[in-house]
Each structure stands twice: as C-alpha cells, then as structure tokens.
Amino acid sequence: MKTSNTQKVVWITGASSGIGLSLAKRYLDNDWQVLASARTQGALTSLMRVYDKLEFIPFDVADASQVDEVRSTIMTFTDHLDCAVLNAGTCEYLDMSAAEPDWKMMERVMSVNFFGLVNCVEVCLPLLKQADKPHLVGVSSQAVQAAFPQAQAYGASKAAIRYFLDSLRIDLTPFNIDVTCLLPGFVDTPLTKKNTFPMPFLMSAEDAAKRMFDALDARPDEYAFPKRLSAVLWFGRHFPKMWRSMLAPKHQDKS
Ligand SMILES: NC(=O)c1ccc[n+]([C@@H]2O[C@H](COP(=O)([O-])OP(=O)(O)OC[C@H]3O[C@@H](n4cnc5c(N)ncnc54)[C@H](OP(=O)(O)O)[C@@H]3O)[C@@H](O)[C@H]2O)c1
C-alpha cells in the first residue's frame, strides 16, 4: 500500500551500515517513512522487524542501468520524496610506493562515489518535485577541506560531489528544492576500520547521524562537522607547505 501524501518520506542510500544505517534509525524514530537502499540488506534486516515504516530497495548506485527500475520500485511505496540522503560511498587508497600503483582504482571509487550519486539524483529528482518542501542531501567529506596522502581517488570524488551539488543548488532553485552538502569528519564505521593513520575527533556513527539529522532541519547549503576538525583543515589549506611537511612520507633513497 502506498504511503499517504502527508507522511514524510526519505530515501537513504548506503543505508545498510555505518552512517546511513544510523541515519535510517534516526528518521524512523522521528516517524518518517524510510526507503533504504544499498547492494545488500545487511543490518537493515533486523531493523525491519522493529520498524513498520522501513523498506529495503536494492540498488548498486554505480550501475546506471538500474535507475529506472529503482525509481519504479520507490513509486510502489510513495508518489513523493520529502528528502533524499545520497550517502552510499566507498574508500580506497592509492599506494604510490607500489611498483605499479593501482590506477584503475580511481575509476572504481569515482563510479561509486561520484557517478553513483549522479545516478541517485536521476532516480529521485522526479519524486522530489512532487513534495511540498523537498530536500536533496549529498554526503561529501571533510577530506575536501585539505589534501590527505593516498586519498587522490576518495578526495577527488568527494570534491566532485561538493561542486556538483553547489551547481545543482542554483539550477534547482526554481523548483524550490533545497540542496545540502554534508562534510562529515572521521566516523567509526566499516569504511574507516581499515585506516591505519590517526583519526582525530573520531565520532560514533550514532553521534554523526544525530548531528546530521539535527543540522538538516535548517537546510544549510553545507554542514561540516566536527568544527574542531574543520579548524585543523583550515590550517592545512592556508599553510600548505607546513601541512605537507607534517603528512608527507619520508624521502625514499634510490640506492
Ligand atoms: N566514515 C567516515 O569517517 C566518513 C567521513 C566522511 C564521509 N563519509 C561518507 O559517508 C558515507 C557512508 O560511509 P560509512 O562510513 O557509513 O561507510 P560504510 O559503513 O562502509 O557504509 C557504506 C554504505 O554504502 C553502501 N555502498 C557501497 N557501495 C555501494 C554501491 N556500489 N551501491 C550502493 N550502495 C553502496 C554500503 O552498502 P553495500 O555494501 O551493501 O552496498 C553501505 O551501506 C560514504 O559516502 C562516505 O564516503 C564517511
């Protein structure tokens, strides 16, 4: 059965773990209908036993051929989307010390993080246009605020998201669609578990989701958090030589 016109509906991508999963819980606890997407249902399975207003819609965001089918599936549940949180993402690092760095990885990461988000916009835009006060939200990263080593693919994909959303915001103004770009700092999720470097001001996924949910209420163009990390990255941006000397690997002797 389709949801009523007055029920608030959010579509969250990358909702099977980490930030997306915590965000789904937060929306559910605030009485939203949640349409949750990822490639695998994962931890959403147990959540669906607890919440009536949660549906899983499988979607590999990197596969553009799924766009029409996913939109049709969403439309079996609702005629409108009040909000779309485009959060699905991945992270891989480029190892420049390898004899043959894995350059193909650039394409893999861009196809999920950037082109995946573009595919999601294609899915949800017609449904956002049916809502009274629609809100489109994309998840970038504080990594865009200063360069990090080995993050060529991840950082570039997140910077591309930021620009894409900034530009989209202008063109969606006539449609009254608000566009927010979220820039989380380090969050303790499966994505960051593999990180071997220090992650200052690391937050839990629940904490990150609470900050995001609360901030989205005011529909800012951009929300970067935590502010302490933004301050550190401001330093990195404005003092690039010092930043590089702090982060660069040791010089490799050719002999
Ligand atoms: N954790 C951090 O410190 C941090 C900081 C800044 C920004 N972010 C961003 O926050 C978002 C969520 O990350 P997270 O930390 O919560 O990571 P996570 O726990 O690994 O969650 C990633 C989510 O994205 C989904 N996903 C991955 N590839 C997908 C694909 N091709 N199609 C559809 N869904 C896909 C995963 O589900 P399936 O594998 O089932 O598809 C999963 O639900 C990402 O965009 C990430 O870049 C994270």
Image (cartoon, grey):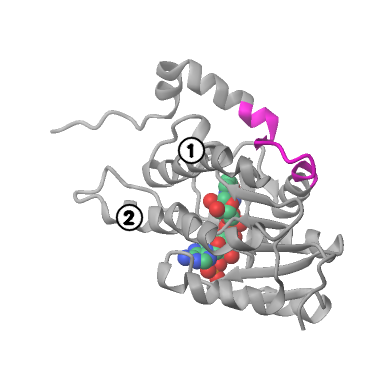
Label 1 CB sits under 8 Å from any ligand 1 atom: no
Q: Amino acid at mark 2?
A: Glu
Residue 121 higher or lower than 150, as above or below:
below
Residue span colored magenta: 214-230
Foreground of the two, 159 or 45: 159
Q: Residue furthest front?
A: 174
List x then y, in percent, for residue 46. Answer: 74, 78
127 left or right of 49 in image: left
Q: Residue furthest bottom?
A: 1
Dot 2: element: helix
Disc 1 and disc 2 in contact, CB within 8 angstroms = no
Q: Is the C terminus in the top left, top right, bottom left or bottom right quadrant?
A: top left
Q: Which numbered marker is on residue 163? A: 1
In this rendering, which labeled residue sits more in front, label 1 or label 2? Answer: 1
Q: Amino acid at mark 1?
A: Tyr
Residue for badge 2: 107
Foreground of the two, 201 or 46: 46
Splitting the image into 4 quarters, where does residue 52 fall?
bottom right
Q: Is 219 one of the magenta-colored residues?
A: yes
Residue 242 higher or lower than 166, as above or below:
above
Dot 1: element: helix
Q: Is the N terminus in the top left, top right, bottom left or bottom right quadrant?
A: bottom right
Picture quarter with ligand 1: bottom right
